């Protein structure tokens, strides 16, 4: 018993000792000792040497009270020589902080005078990091959850390597310079100014709000994004918006690395509050509703006001509202939304106005927001878009496909065009022969000519001649389908639903639907059943009124009774549905889509 | 009243000895009388009996689990109070305080680690202690109600740990509490109300954080302390730890314990060693009653001082050493700050509720409320259902094979569910292999 008692006592004792040792013995003491030794070697007088002899390492602590939130900084516990000019060639951390005339330091009477004194500004107001940390990892913010790692110096372990490689360099500190130096032409914050320019040039302002800069409402507010996000997130999100947020609708901008850097620095400088700002200034800024208009936007607004006709005004509005951040118009391609170049040939004014007021009234699953703009603006923009009627130049079928179809259906015809992921329903995969070759040619021609209601497929009938449509279809056939049209055995199908529409019939249809169809089409019939995620093409949204109303009873009967070749829709005759069952289901589906018309 | 005139010099000379004597009353005991006196004249020792049975001291009998649980509670209180100096129950500051504890507070990391691991340890030890009590049949009369108090203490321990889980305000905390309180919401009739009272809101937020904090640092520890006190008091009054029947009814021997009569009106307190005993009483002659077991002293007992005390000291040191070692090598987890928009998949409750969550994945009501409710009710009623008197005070007594088997099954099923929930459940609560 005594032995056991002695052993555990010893363990507790040794453990406590180890804890205290671990807590009190730190590398900063070694740095200070090295500094004292070196300083002693360089000392010129005995008195100086004697004073160094009696020095022992202690935590060097600055309390910064006059600049931003009061904070404790212990950086000089390691960086003890930062203000001792003799250590200019020393090794970090025992090294003089460089003097810089560009930062306002003055060389006078043989020694430098700092403009940003450490005692006044501290270290973290420029560098970020954690002022109170006493180990390198803590102080530099290497802890993966520390929100402010040292800008441009510290890369946290969990940052993706290909991103982290871009995030080194003193340039990133410009984001902090800009906290106080807000002048747009300030020499030290050139990259912030460049980033701001890109923010407007790339149309970011159309979706994102930054207080005092822009007032977009679609994307997240970026007013404090520099405080909320770290460099790796900002960079990574610009490179691939869906890397961090799989559901993001932000387009992937093709920027050079230099431009990405400038944009990241500009965003990092958006911190909301600034240490140089007095509480009164902060209050004034927060309550101000005035958004100063940047030059590029001011030009557009002047142009809108100056525009004399509705059409001219509409054209300027489309620029002013940054529609082209998403849409394509002539050579400017936002990469998300449909091409507006030929809009005057594709749609009519009523369609456009409906769609402006509520895009989902025409395309049920559209991701375009319903903008709360004055009716006059909608009319002007519609008027402008209706002027987009210029005839196409003569093109070969291949060129036609390239310029009109490839953006959605893809260069390989596989339905994976550059903006396909934003479209719901997704563009048809033209390489799926099982689907394409089993559909009558008349239906395919009609789809091109009249478009497909309720989807993003527009009617090309006014843009392309019949011959051109046939030519494109031939091209698609030769290039992607690569199979002869299959002969389908004549199917016995009613032209109109033989089962009369009645509450009973709808109820019977609903019962069958809930038993047989919800696995893929979902309980709400919106195409989002539990199995739908594994199925391409996706199950049809049966509440898409525009689409359902455009489809004949005959086609609904065919799809249900015989299935749809090339999709997951099976032939329900094989599963025992009778003609009258299908009639009930058709009545049920029709009943879902009546209210909207 | 001393006859000699007061001498300052003499007072000064005797000062240290006088202070020590005034504090401790007794010198280190060298006789049985002294050992007995030490036990009952010291506030902290008088909760213990003067003599304790050898059976209760055998490590293989109790495994010290109850004591370990208690000492863990003491460690938790000590580290918890220190942590309170740094913690702010605010959704905007709590997480920052965690980062501060990790990087710039002296001994912050070890404090948090010790608190965290001791809390997990306490949940485990209290449960194991309950198993020990069951398997040794120690809940038999007259200890029925102490078992009930014990079950309540287990519940309070779980609640304390659960409320503490939210405080770091990281993803782990937020979603574990979201899951945990949702399970509470499945209770019929009162579930929604309980959930709302706990959270002070429809979802986990600032109100919930404040409520959990107050529950964690004030309400639950206070209730726990009172229950622990009653638990201990009843152990004494029920005649110490349960013993086998053969020993439980020993031949009665009158034990003589000396109690001093007050020697002089000035010395109002019982100063056992200072004055020679004036008279002798037997305790038997003093108190009698059905509850007080003083008269039933067995032969096979030893003095608490030093035997019990050394054992307790050993368990205390062992507990501290264990917690310290674990805290030295394993850091308390801290995940990303709360992000309401990004639930982890799967979101898991604290490990001791994962058995519950596993059950909930089959049926919300039966898994979360029905079955656990019945289990807790049965636990509380065990001593009133199982009235047999055999097999008390021995591990896995043959006479109790049915009761022990049923309880073992209950324990194993719960452990099995926790293991499944902890290691074998991945995204969407799909079965995954951890290997």
Image (cartoon, rainbow, N blue to C red):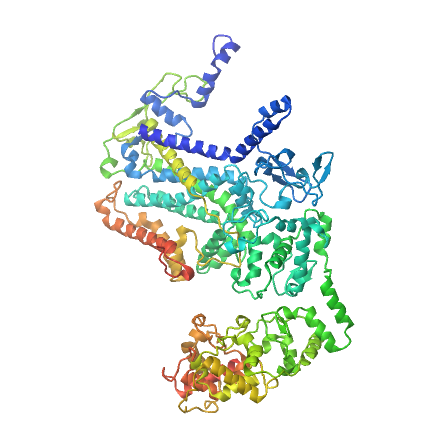
Q: Is residue A51 above or below residue A435?
A: above
Q: Where is residue B132? Give x, y as percent.
A: 31, 43
Q: Residue B393, located in which quarter of the rendered image?
A: top left
Q: Residue B432, located in which quarter of the rendered image?
A: bottom left
Q: Is residue B106 above or below residue A363?
A: above
Q: Where is residue A23? Give x, y as percent.
A: 49, 35
Location of the C terminus of chain A by quadrant is: bottom right
Q: Nearer the viewer, residue A557 or B48?
A: A557
Query: Which residue is most to the top?
Result: B4
Location of the N terminus of chain A by quadrant is: top left
Q: Is residue A588 visible?
A: no
**Is A114 left, or right, of A459 in this rendering?**
right
Q: How many marks?
A: 0
Q: Where is residue A81? Give x, y as percent.
A: 61, 35
Q: Where is residue B249? Give x, y as percent.
A: 24, 35
Q: Residue B358, located in which quarter of the rendered image?
A: bottom left
**Is B402 left, or right, of A148 in this rendering?**
left
Q: Nearer the viewer, residue A405 or B323?
A: A405
Q: Is residue A133 above or below residue A453?
A: above
Residue at x 40% of width, y 36% of height: B320
Q: Is residue B99 visible?
A: yes
Q: Nearer the viewer, residue A424 or A6?
A: A424
Q: Nearer the viewer, residue A585 or A124?
A: A124
């Amino acid at each position: 018993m005594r032995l056991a008692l002695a052993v555990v006592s010893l363990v507790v004792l040794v453990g406590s000792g180890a804890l205290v040792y671990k807590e009190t013995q730190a590398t900063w003491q070694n740095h200070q000792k090295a500094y004292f030794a070196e300083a002693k070697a360089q000392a010129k007088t005995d008195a100086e040497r004697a004073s160094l002899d009696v020095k022992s390492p202690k935590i060097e602590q600055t309390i910064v009270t006059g600049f931003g939130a009061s904070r404790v900084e212990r950086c000089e516990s390691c960086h003890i020589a930062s203000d001792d000019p003799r250590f200019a060639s020393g090794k970090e951390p025992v090294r003089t902080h460089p003097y810089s005339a560009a930062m306002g330091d003055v060389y006078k009477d043989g020694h430098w005078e700092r403009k940003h004194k450490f005692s006044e500004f501290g270290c973290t107001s420029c560098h970020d990091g954690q002022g109170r940390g006493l180990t390198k990892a803590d102080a530099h913010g290497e802890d993966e959850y520390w929100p402010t790692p040292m800008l441009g110096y510290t890369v946290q372990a969990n940052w993706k390597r290909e991103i982290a490689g871009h995030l080194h360099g003193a340039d990133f500190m410009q984001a902090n310079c800009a906290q106080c130096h807000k002048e747009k032409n300030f020499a030290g914050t050139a990259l912030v100014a460049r980033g701001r320019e890109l923010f407007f040039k790339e149309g970011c302002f159309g979706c994102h709000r930054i207080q005092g800069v822009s007032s977009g409402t679609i994307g997240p507010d970026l007013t404090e994004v520099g405080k909320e996000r770290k460099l790796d997130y900002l960079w990574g999100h610009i490179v691939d918006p869906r890397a961090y947020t799989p559901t993001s609708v932000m387009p992937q901008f093709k920027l050079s690395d230099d431009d990405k850097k400038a944009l990241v620095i500009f965003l990092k400088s958006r911190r909301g509050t600034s240490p140089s700002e007095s509480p009164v200034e902060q209050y004034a800024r927060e309550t101000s509703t005035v958004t100063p208009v940047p030059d590029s936007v001011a030009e557009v607004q002047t142009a809108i006001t100056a525009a004399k006709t509705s059409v001219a005004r509409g054209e300027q509005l489309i620029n002013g509202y940054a529609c082209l951040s998403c849409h394509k118009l002539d050579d400017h391609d936002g990469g998300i939304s449909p091409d507006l170049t030929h809009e005057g040939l594709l749609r009519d004014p009523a369609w456009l106005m409906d769609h402006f007021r509520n895009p989902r009234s025409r395309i049920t699953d559209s991701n375009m927001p319903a903008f709360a703009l004055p009716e006059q603006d909608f009319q002007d923009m519609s008027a402008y878009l209706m002027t987009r009627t210029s005839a196409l130049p003569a093109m070969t079928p291949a060129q036609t496909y390239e310029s009109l179809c490839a953006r959605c259906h893809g260069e390989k015809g596989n339905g994976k065009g550059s903006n396909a992921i934003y479209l719901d329903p997704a563009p048809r995969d033209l390489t799926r022969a099982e689907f394409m070759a089993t559909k009558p040619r008349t239906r395919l021609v009609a789809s091109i000519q009249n478009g497909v209601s309720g989807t993003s497929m527009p009617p090309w009938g006014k843009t392309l001649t019949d011959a051109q449509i046939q030519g494109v279809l031939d091209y698609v056939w030769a290039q992607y389908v690569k199979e002869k049209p299959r002969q389908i055995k004549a199917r016995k199908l009613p032209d109109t639903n033989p089962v009369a529409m009645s509450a009973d019939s709808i109820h019977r249809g609903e019962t069958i639907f809930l038993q047989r169809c919800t696995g893929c089409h979902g309980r709400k019939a919106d195409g989002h059943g539990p199995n739908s995620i594994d199925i391409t093409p996706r199950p049809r949204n049966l509440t898409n009124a525009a689409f359902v109303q455009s489809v004949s009873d005959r086609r609904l009967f065919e799809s249900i009774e015989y299935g749809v070749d090339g999709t997951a829709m099976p032939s329900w005759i094989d599963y025992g549905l009778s003609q009258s069952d299908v009639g009930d289901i058709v009545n049920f589906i029709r009943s879902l889509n009546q209210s909207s018309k | 009243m001393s006859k000699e005139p007061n001498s300052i010099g003499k007072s000064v000379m005797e000062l240290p000895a006088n202070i020590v004597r005034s504090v401790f009353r007794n010198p280190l005991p060298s006789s049985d009388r002294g050992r007995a006196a030490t036990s009952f004249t010291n506030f902290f020792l008088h909760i213990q009996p003067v003599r304790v049975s050898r059976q209760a001291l055998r490590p293989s009998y109790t495994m010290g689990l109850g004591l370990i649980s208690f000492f863990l509670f003491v460690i938790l209180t000590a580290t918890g109070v220190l942590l309170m100096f740094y913690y702010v129950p605010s959704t905007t500051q709590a997480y920052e305080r965690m980062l501060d504890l990790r990087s710039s507070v002296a001994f912050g990391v070890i404090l948090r680690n010790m608190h965290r691991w001791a809390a997990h340890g306490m949940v485990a030890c209290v449960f194991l202690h309950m198993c020990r009590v069951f398997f040794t049949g120690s809940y038999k009369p007259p200890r029925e109600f102490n078992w009930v108090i014990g079950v309540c203490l287990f519940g309070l321990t779980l609640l304390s740990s659960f409320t503490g889980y939210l405080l770091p305000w990281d993803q782990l905390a937020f979603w574990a509490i979201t899951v945990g309180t949702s399970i509470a919401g499945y209770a019929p009739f009162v579930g929604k109300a309980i959930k709302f009272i706990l959270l002070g809101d429809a979802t986990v937020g600032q109100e919930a954080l404040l409520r959990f904090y107050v529950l964690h640092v004030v309400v639950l520890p206070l209730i726990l302390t009172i229950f622990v006190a009653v638990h201990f008091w009843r152990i004494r009054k029920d005649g110490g730890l349960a013993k086998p029947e053969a020993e439980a009814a020993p031949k009665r021997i009158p034990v003589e314990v000396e109690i001093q009569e007050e020697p002089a009106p000035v010395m109002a307190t019982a100063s056992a060693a200072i004055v020679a005993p004036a008279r002798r009483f037997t305790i038997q002659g003093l108190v009698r009653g059905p509850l007080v077991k003083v008269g039933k002293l067995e032969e096979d007992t030893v003095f608490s001082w030093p035997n019990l005390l050394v054992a307790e000291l050993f368990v205390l040191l062992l507990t501290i050493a264990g917690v310290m070692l674990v805290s030295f090598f394993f850091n308390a987890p801290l995940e990303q700050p709360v992000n309401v928009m990004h639930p982890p998949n799967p979101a898991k409750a604290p490990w001791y509720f994962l058995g519950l969550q596993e059950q909930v994945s089959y049926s919300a009501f039966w898994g979360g409320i029905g079955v656990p409710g019945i289990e807790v009710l049965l636990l509380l009623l065990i001593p009133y259902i199982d009235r047999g008197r055999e097999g008390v005070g021995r591990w896995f007594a043959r006479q109790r094979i049915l009761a022990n088997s049923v309880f073992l099954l209950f324990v194993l099923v719960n452990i099995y569910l926790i293991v499944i929930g902890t290691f074998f459940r991945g995204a969407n609560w799909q079965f995954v292999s951890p290997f």
